[in-house]
Amino acid sequence: MPTSAQKENRAIVAGSMDYGLSGESIVCFAGEDWWYHFPHSKNHIMKRLAQQNRVLFVNSLTLGLPSISNPDFFLKIWRKLQSYLRWLRRVPEGLHVLTPFVLPFFSLKTVRAINRILLILQLRLVMLLCGMRKPILWVASPAAVDVVDQLGAKLLVYQVSDKYEANEDSALSREIIRGMDQELKNRAAVVLYSGRKLFEEADVPYRFFLEQAVDFKHFATETMTTAADIASIPRPVLGYFGFIDYVIDVPLIEEVARLRPDWHWVFIGTKSNLIQISATNVHFLGRRPYKELPRYLRHFDVCVLPWSQQNVFTSYGSAIKVREYLASGKPVVISPLYEYLHTSGVRIYRTTQEFIAAVEDALWRDTEVDRQLRQSSVRNGTWDLRTQEVSVLISSLLDKAAARRRQTESHHNQKPLGPVV
């Protein structure tokens, strides 16, 4: 007899899965822009919810610009300006994406007040255009705190994906970010934690562990061809995809590139100006479409996550890419990220020599059994199942909120009894 998980997976393949939430309006305040990142949890979940609901994806409001001395200062401004030019677009995934005009400063009360007015006017207009009313607010950016009470929401859900106050991309003070974060936690019907360490350290009573997931079929199905721009790079290849910024351990890469000149590093994604590595065996291919990633993975011999171990922000990370690596079946070597310390099939390193030993072990001693173990560790953790879990949770919260409203209305409508004679 097939297990319940197998039945659910068959339903997914057949395209008939009921996520458990329909007919709602959902406004998602994301922590990133739809256009410039490989999909985060919000992208994966929202495009699924959009099949049966009206969904507005609000691109990152940012937590303020980095310092003007930051090498990426003008790069970030240029990228945001490109998003502003799109303002409101309907995307092929069936939802609307909005980049609202705001001033990228949150430390001044007057600017926050102006941004609040700008946001409310734009959001109300767009909600009217999209036929949305009494929305569910899914907030994944602390900067949205100033508008959540102004949209007639029936429910507020707050997703915490990172240790926000440790973000090095913003010049905004940690105290202000921490205050925004706490205010949203106080107002939310539930706080969703997308990182194991974040969840375990949380002290809010109404919390839910929204574990990261994977588009398993996309990464587990081996492609027949290799992307042309990676095919010419000699092997073995140590591959990475995602943002290439301050989280990357540059000294480690430089040392390994020197000690093992026959190993070739390949980085796929947007590269920060902070990252300056000049070695003939380190290759930066730039950003590539998400749908094309399996054609690059095909040429990887080992998937790596060379994140800095001294960075507080990354220590809380849950790196979806690790699950995508695992789904491919390829060997995986990563820094000691708390999220994956006990994940089957992952090789952990803490020093340069441990990294080299782990890669050598992966190249010389990895087996088909190891490959199957890695894939089995994430096979049942799909975005379809994760969307269903959170939909059931939201439906339950909506039912409870409706029951409380009925009870309150019933209490107010009761006529007081006259005096007893």
Image (spheres, rainbow, N blue to C red):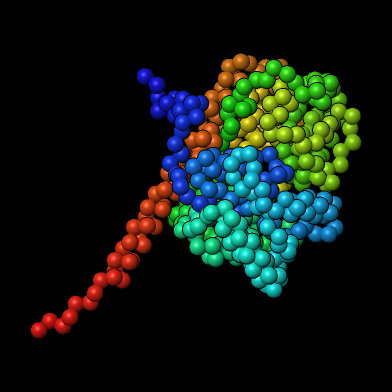
Q: Is residue 337 above or below residue 184?
A: above
Q: Can you give x and y, in whole percent of width and height, for residue 394 in the image?
A: 45, 49
Q: Can you give x and y, in whole percent of width and height, for residue 214 in the image?
A: 58, 33
Left or right of 191? Residue 78 is right
Q: Quadrant of the N terminus?
A: top left
Kindly tell me whether residue 46 is visible in this rendering.
Answer: yes
Q: Residue at x 83, y 23 (%)?
A: 233
Left or right of 145? Residue 306 is right
Q: Residue at x 59, y 32 (%)?
A: 215
The image quadrant of residue 5 is top left
Foreground pick, 356 / 5: 5
Q: Residue at x 67, y 62 (%)?
A: 174
Left or right of 164? Residue 282 is right
Q: Is residue 389 above or below residue 258?
A: below
Q: Is residue 2 above or below residue 18?
A: above
The image quadrant of residue 369 is top right
Q: Count the marks: how many?
A: 0
The image quadrant of residue 42 is top right
Q: Can you give x and y, in whole percent of width and height, for residue 206 in the image?
A: 45, 54
Kindly tell me whether residue 354 is visible in this rendering.
Answer: no
Q: Residue at x 51, y 51 (%)?
A: 25
Q: Can you give x and y, in whole percent of width and height, for residue 266 in the image?
A: 79, 30
Q: Quadrant of the C terminus?
A: bottom left
